[in-house]
Image (spheres, grey):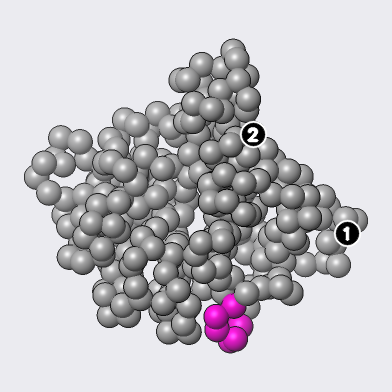
Amino acid sequence: MKSAGTVRIGISGWTYAPWRGVFYPENVTHKRELAYASGIFRSIEINGTFYSMQRPNSFARWAEETPDDFVFSLKGPHNLTHIRRLKDAEQALANFFSSGLLALGGKLGPILWQLPPNFRFQPELLESFLELLPHSMDEAATLARKHDEFMGGRSLTVPVSQQPLRHAMEVRNQSFAVPKFIALLRKHQVALVCADTVEWPRMMDVTADFVYCRLHGAEVLYASGYTDEALDQWAGRVVAWTRGMEPEDAEKVRKAKPQKCASRDVFVYFDNDLKVRAPFDAQSLRKRVDKLLLPDGPGAK
């Protein structure tokens, strides 16, 4: 039986009014929602970092409110991916890394770089961006110290832990479905996000030592849930990835196999939140994966 990496299945964001009284019990106050959700899931994506610059005290509070073995993934800022469109990125990256995310310490997981649907593959621009990304906490701190003056009173530029820093990229334009893009991600050890949606390309190429999936809705973007059959399929894929293999049904751009791994960490986030499906689908998938990973379970061989 192959060994397995760490599997973290969670939700994208945790503050949604329709979830109150449905996923969150009536007696859970708004301030206690993160503590409640992190008691159920092993990881959550932070969406707030995409929309606006956060502060060190917010990251420190989130770290304090979650269990010791919990991990956050963070979305890179909208200003960098959608407005600047990765151009002249170094200063914006310095501001982002100085904004306090180092306060998460060991709870800092992958950073998600989500590109807009009208962003087409531009190899030289993309490589210049990938070359800037820090891959350790010390590298992130060094970059953070280059922040703009206005960040001076609201910055953190000293790491509070030491661990590798991971990055994942989600693309939403068919022009990225080419071998050169996959090769670039592998060169820079950035994971290709496997995005499950009917509106954007779904690619399952493994480009790093971990796998990152975002499940946006099987039929309707951000809204529809997943059937038992679909969740069974995703559970099988997760187990294959975490054991260092590839799913038999992997939809790949590049035929070349990724570097061999005895095991891989896998992150899966449900983003079908509009109809309160995300937290329940996430729990259902986790139960299926746990069952397959049991020593004598159906996925043991």
Does the magenta segment cover residue 256? yes
Q: Nearer the viewer, residue 247 or 261?
A: 247
Among the 4 quarters of the image, the one containing residue 100:
top left
Which residue is outermost to the left? 149
> What kind of secondary structure does the magenta stretch mostly adopt?
loop
Residue at (17% x, 65% y) in the render: 88
Does the magenta segment cover residue 67? no
Q: Which residue is mark 2?
A: 40
Residue 24: x and y, percent? 60, 24
Residue at (73% x, 56% y) in the render: 230
Q: Amino acid at mark 1?
A: Pro
Residue 253: x and y, percent? 55, 80
Which quadrant: the C terminus? Answer: bottom right
Residue 186: x and y, percent? 47, 77
Answer whether residue 268 is visible to the viewer in this image. no
Q: Nearer the viewer, residue 105 or 35?
A: 35
Q: Residues within 10 Å of mark 1 (few under 14, many from 20)?
A: few
Q: Nearer the viewer, residue 92 or 264?
A: 92
What is the secondary structure assignment of the residue under circle 2? loop
Q: Amino acid at mark 2?
A: Ile
61 versus 46 height, above or below: above
280 versus 239 height, above or below: above
The span picked out in magenta is 252-258
Residue 206: x and y, percent? 56, 72
Q: Is residue 222 left or right of residue 47?
A: right
What is the secondary structure assignment of the residue under circle 1? loop
Q: Which residue is mark 1?
A: 298
Q: Residues within 10 Å of mark 2 (few under 14, many from 20)?
A: few
Which residue is outermost to the top? 27
Instruction: Calculate the distance from the C-alpha at mark 1 to the C-alpha at mark 2.
Output: 24 Å
Which residue is outermost to the front? 220
